Image: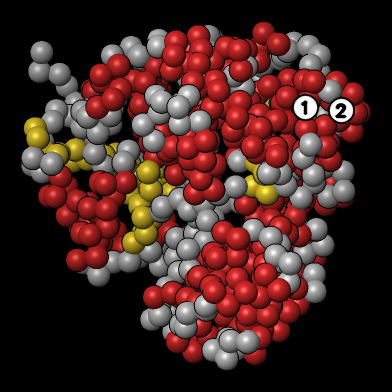
């Protein structure tokens, strides 16, 4: 979006802030978090660190908190409370068992206290505390309103309660300058708090003028007709919503194909063969996508494509780096910020050992740390200088970090790892297996922040916050056929779409069927199907199998609703 905007309006660079809710909220907390006792360089926790905090609370209050099976399950409940901005006093009433509710309230309150005490936040608490700040400190909200007089929210249908509350705090007036872009037929993140009713909340809170844009310039007319026939079966839609209007001329040939297979294995093989034929006809891999509701089906297709020697890519979301070099760089930067964290020092030492293929002695690190009054960063510098296996380039990088030159550290360390990767070849060393991919992700993150000049002009704390918020999921190689879940495909478009698993218990899912035919879960599954088919530019192939994992399955009800199959009743 930034690239498109600046291309259209070059002079807007210094007048417009393009950001995500989380990045915006992080910036507000950097400036005003002192009201909570947060300093501007607060850390954004990784999942394992969050689990560690919950475990510590459960251990400290073992006699009091007896109802929690695991820290991970407790964290799921806390995430729900954070994204719904749940007041502490309301928590006990949310659960059938009042004792469980009371214990969850105790855990939630203590978890928030520890975040503030340790000067750290997690992904959900960023919005939670930002909303609390804007609500409790109206002067801050008023100041922000004088700075940001016009607010535009894209993909509004994906907002959760916390995000919407932040918007309301920034623009509380009914006639506020708010411009919203969204489609309640594309709400597919209910698990994260999105809801089709939020559009109606918006209409209640603001004096809106609604502009409908039903024109569809992407899909063939036949696909648009399918989408319209499908989505009218949903009850939770904006009233008076116009059907999609195809603006694309038909080609005279039917772009839609529906295929039936006897088993899920045969389905995967059949789709792989069709993709192979498409590639042989001159279509580029980037023009093809295989979509499914669940990753398991995509993995079968990937295996079938591998058997035909066709490169493919199943996207898996990553929240942190996994290669030894990138783990070393990021954990060392974190240590430079806090300097005295023993666990973090161990993480850095382990990553360093993986990079140089020789164990760095944690006992030596501990003795250096003791001699340096617990300064683990100084201790790391002493350790690398006294470890012959650590190459001179990495020694220089770490010494730059000890001197506070974090940008010099990044450049020296990455230059060394780039050189090593060039020498050993891509993936031949297990610890470097993901390095090339993650190095590209790093460059993408730097570009998202602005460029190297903008990114590396940030303070170390701010840079680490931006790094923590950034998506670390790698892009598919240009020579690979992409295999995506429907959720991952949202916002994308492809010339040729293969939507597999169009059977009951797959799409719609088993869980949505359990909830009922008219349930909000079933309506979301229908929106999933709507989103999937409207990724199509030229052709749409849908397939289903009579058996999945050995169990007989009926064709998806959505095929009947779209008029592609006729009921035998």
Q: Quadrant of the C terminus?
A: top left
Q: Position of residue 417 (x, y in %)?
A: 57, 80
Snapshot quadrant of residue 488:
top left
Residue 171 located left or right of residue 225? right
Colouring style: secondary structure
Res. 49 in view: yes
Q: Which of the two discs, 2 and 1, labels the residue nearer the N terminus?
A: 1
Q: Position of residue 327 (x, y in %)?
A: 54, 66
Q: Position of residue 331 (x, y in %)?
A: 60, 63
For the residue labelled by badge 2, is the local secondary structure a helix, a strand or a loop? Answer: helix
Is disc 2 in contact with disc 1, using a CB cutoff of under 8 Å? yes
Viewer-proximal residue, 350 or 86? 350
Image vertical order of residue 399 relative to residue 535, above or below? below
Residue for point 68% across, 80% down: 382
- Number of other residues with Cα within 10 Å of mark 1, as a class: few under 14, some 14 to 19, many 20 or more: many
Viewer-proximal residue, 407 or 342? 342
Res. 451 in view: no
According to the image, label 2 marks what residue? 140
Q: Which mark identifies residue 91?
A: none
Residue 293 located left or right of residue 551? right
Residue 172 located left or right of residue 517? right
For the residue labelled by badge 1, is the local secondary structure a helix, a strand or a loop? Answer: helix
Q: Position of residue 101 (x, y in %)?
A: 47, 16
Snapshot quadrant of residue 330:
bottom right
According to the image, label 1 marks what residue? 133
Viewer-proximal residue, 527 or 437? 437
Residue for point 57% across, 59% down: 343
Distance from the alpha carbon under mark 2 to that under mark 1: 8 Å
Snapshot quadrant of residue 113:
top right
Residue for point 56% across, 27% down: 108
């Amino acid at each position: 979006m930034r690239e498109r905007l600046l291309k259209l309006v070059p002079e807007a660079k210094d007048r417009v802030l393009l950001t995500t809710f989380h990045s915006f909220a992080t910036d507000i907390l950097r400036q005003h978090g002192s009201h909570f006792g947060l300093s501007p360089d607060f850390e954004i926790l990784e999942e394992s660190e969050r689990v560690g905090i919950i475990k510590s609370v459960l251990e400290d209050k073992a006699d009091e908190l007896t109802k929690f099976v695991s820290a991970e399950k407790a964290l799921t409940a806390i995430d729900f409370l954070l994204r719904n901005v749940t007041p502490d006093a309301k928590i006990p009433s949310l659960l059938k068992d009042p004792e469980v509710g009371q214990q969850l309230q105790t855990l939630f309150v203590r978890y928030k206290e520890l975040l503030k005490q340790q000067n750290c936040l997690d992904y959900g608490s960023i919005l939670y505390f930002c909303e609390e700040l804007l609500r409790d400190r109206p002067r801050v909200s008023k100041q922000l309103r004088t700075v940001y007089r016009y607010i535009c929210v894209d993909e509004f249908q994906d907002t959760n309660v916390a995000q919407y509350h932040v918007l309301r705090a920034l623009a509380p007036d009914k006639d506020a300058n708010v411009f919203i872009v969204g489609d309640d037929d594309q709400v597919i993140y209910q698990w994260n708090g999105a809801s089709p009713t939020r559009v109606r909340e918006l209409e209640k809170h603001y004096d809106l003028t609604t502009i409908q844009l039903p024109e569809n310039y992407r899909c063939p007319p036949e696909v648009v007709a399918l989408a319209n026939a499908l989505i009218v079966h949903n009850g939770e839609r904006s009233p008076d919503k116009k059907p999609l209007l195809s603006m694309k001329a038909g080609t005279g040939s039917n772009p839609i194909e529906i295929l039936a297979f006897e088993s899920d294995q045969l389905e995967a093989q059949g789709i792989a063969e069709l993709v192979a034929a498409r590639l042989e006809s001159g279509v580029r891999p980037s023009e093809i996508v295989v979509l499914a509701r669940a990753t398991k089906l995509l993995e079968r297709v990937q295996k079938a494509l591998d058997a035909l020697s066709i490169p493919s890519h199943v996207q898996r979301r990553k929240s942190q780096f996994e290669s030894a070099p990138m783990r070393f760089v990021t954990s060392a930067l974190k240590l430079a910020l806090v300097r005295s964290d023993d666990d973090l020092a161990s993480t850095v030492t382990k990553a360093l050992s993986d990079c140089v293929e020789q164990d760095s002695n944690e006992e030596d690190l501990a003795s250096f740390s003791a001699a340096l009054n617990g300064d683990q960063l100084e201790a790391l510098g002493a350790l690398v200088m006294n470890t012959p296996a650590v190459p001179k380039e990495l020694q220089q990088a770490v010494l730059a970090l000890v001197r506070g030159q974090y940008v010099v550290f990044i450049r020296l360390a990455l230059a060394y790892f780039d050189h090593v990767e060039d020498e050993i070849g891509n993936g031949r060393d297990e610890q470097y297996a993901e390095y090339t991919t993650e190095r590209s992700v790093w460059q993408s993150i730097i570009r998202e922040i602005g460029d190297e000049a903008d990114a590396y002009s940030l303070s170390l704390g701010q840079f680490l916050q931006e790094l923590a918020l950034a998506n670390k999921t790698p892009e598919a190689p240009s020579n690979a056929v992409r295999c995506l879940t429907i959720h991952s495909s949202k916002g994308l478009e492809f010339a040729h779409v293969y939507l597999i698993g169009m059977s009951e218990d797959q799409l719609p899912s088993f869980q949505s069927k359990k909830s009922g035919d008219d349930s909000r879960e079933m309506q979301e599954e229908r929106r999933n199907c709507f989103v999937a088919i409207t990724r199509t530019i030229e052709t749409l192939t849908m397939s289903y199998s009579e058996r999945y994992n050995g169990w007989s399955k009926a064709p998806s009800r959505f095929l009947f609703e779209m008029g592609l199959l006729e009921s035998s009743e």
